[in-house]
Image (spheres, grey):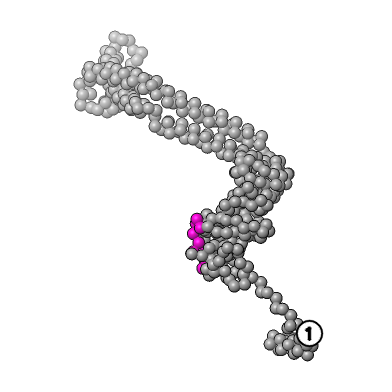
Amino acid sequence: MKTHMPPLVSALLWLACCSLAGCNVLAQATPAPLPTVVLGELSTTPGAPAIPGQSGGVTASGVAAPARQAQLVFTLPGKVETVEVEVGERVEAGQTLMRLAGKQDLQAAIANAEYNLAAAQKALDDLNRSVEDRRTAASERISNATKALRDAAYQLDNFTVPSNQATLSTQKALELMEARLDEARLAFEPYRYYPSTNSVRKELKEKLDAAQADYNAAVRRLQYETEVEVARANLKDALEAFETWRDGPDPAELALAQARRANAQAALDAARLQLDGLELKAPFAGTVARINVEQSEWVIAGQPALLLADLDDLQVQTTDLSELDIPGIKPGAQVRVTIKALGEEVSGRVIRVAPLADVLGGDVVYQVVIALDEIPEGLRAGMSVTVHFPGE
C-alpha cells in the first residue's frame, strides 16, 4: 500500500539530498515562467510577451472564424436522394446542395391544389359577375309579387261575405259552414233517389244547395285571404333579395366563396412549401465546410445536414474577455491582432460586443467580434490569435 508524505516533509528531504550531492540542480538557471494574461487590468502583465509598439491595454485570446456560417437542416423528414456537393466546394447563393426523395408525389399534390384553387376562383368570379343578374331577377320578382298582391287584394275587397258569416272569422266560418253542409248532406241522403217532385226531397235539396253555397263562399274567402298573405310574403322576400344584391353579392355567399378560395390557396402554398423543403439550398455564397449525411440515408426534420461557411470573409472572435475588461471595450475601437500560426500582426476594429455573457471555466466572459482591416494570405478559420485592446 502506498503512503503519502506531507508536501512540506517531501520538500525538506529533497533539499537535503541536493545538499549532500553538491546540489548542482539548484545551480542551474531557473526556467522562465509561462507568460500569463491578467484580464481586467489596463496593462500587459509582467512576464507576458510584449507586442512591438504596444503597451498597456487588455490582451485577449481569440480565434479566426467565418463572418457567416450556417448549419443547414431539412424542414421535412425523408430519404436523401442526392448530395449535390462535396466538402470544400464553393457554392453560390440559392444553389441546391441536397435533395430528398418524394418530388413526384408533391408535384401531383400541387397540381391538384392548383385545380382546386382555379375552381374556387371561378366560383368567386361567377358570383361577382352574377350580381347584376340577381338584381334584375329580384326586381322582376318585386314586380310580379306586387301585381299578385294587388290582384289578390282586389278579389278579397270585392268579395261579399254572406250575412250568416259576416260576424265570424274566416276559419270559424269555414268550420261552421262545413258542419252545416255535412248535416244537410246527411239529411238529404235518404231522399236522394226520390222523384224530384217529392216535396220533402225538394225542400232538403234546397237546404243542401244553400249549405253548399255558404261553404263555397267560406272557402273562397279563405282562398282570397291566403292569396293576399302569400303575395305579401313573396313581395317581402323579393324586396329582401333586392336589398341583399343591391350593393354586391350576398354577404353569406361571398364569405363562403372567399373562404373556399383562401382554403385552396393555403393548400397550394403548403404543397409548394413541402416541395421546396425537399431541397436544401445555400442561403449565401460560401464553402461547404462539413457534410453530415450520405445519399440514401434517412434524416429527420431539424437534423444538421450540412455546414456552410463564408471562408472569404473571416473575422476574429475573442474567447476570454472577462466582465472586468468589457466595460472599456466599445464598437468601433481599433485593435491589433497577432496571428500566431502566420507570425503576422494586422489591425482591426470592434464591430460587436456580446450583450450576454458566457461562462468559461467558472469565469464570466463576453465575446467581442473584430473585423480585420486586411485578411492575411494563409489565414484559415480556426487559427488562434491574440488581440490587444489599447488602453485609454
Question: Residue 266, relative to residue 383: is it above or below?
Answer: above
Residue density around tag 1, few if under 14, some if 14–19, many if 20 or more, within 10 Å: few
Nearer-the-camera pick, 193 or 28 = 28
Q: Could you tell whether 356 is left or right of 209 in the image?
A: right
Question: Residue 5, relative to residue 211: is it above or below?
Answer: below
Judged by its main secondary structure, the magenta piece is loop
Q: Could you tell whether 210 is left or right of 346 in the image?
A: left
Question: Residue 91, relative to residue 37: is it above or below?
Answer: above
State the extent of the magenta-drawn residues as a range.
323-333
Question: Residue 154, relative to residue 382: is it above or below?
Answer: above
* Residue at horizontal 73 percent and vertical 83 percent from the top: 26
Where's residue 314, x and y in %? 61, 51
Screen quadrant of the N terminus:
bottom right
The amino acid type of the residue labelled 1 equals: Met
Indicate the quadrant where residue 97 lies: top right
Nearer-the-camera pick, 184 or 7 = 7
Most extreme residue toward the front is 53
Q: Could you tell whether 78 is left or right of 149 in the image?
A: right
Is residue 200 something that shows in the picture? no
Q: Secondary structure at mark 1?
A: loop
Q: Is residue 285 magenta?
A: no
Where's residue 14, x and y in %? 74, 86
Is residue 337 something that shows in the picture? yes
Q: On the image, numbered disc 1 is attached to which residue?
A: 1
Q: Is residue 329 magenta?
A: yes
* Residue at horizontal 70 percent and vertical 47 percent from the top: 88
* Residue at horizontal 46 percent and vertical 26 percent from the top: 125
Where's residue 94, x and y in %? 61, 39
* Residue at horizontal 36 percent and vertical 13 percent from the top: 193
Where's residue 148, x and y in %? 30, 18
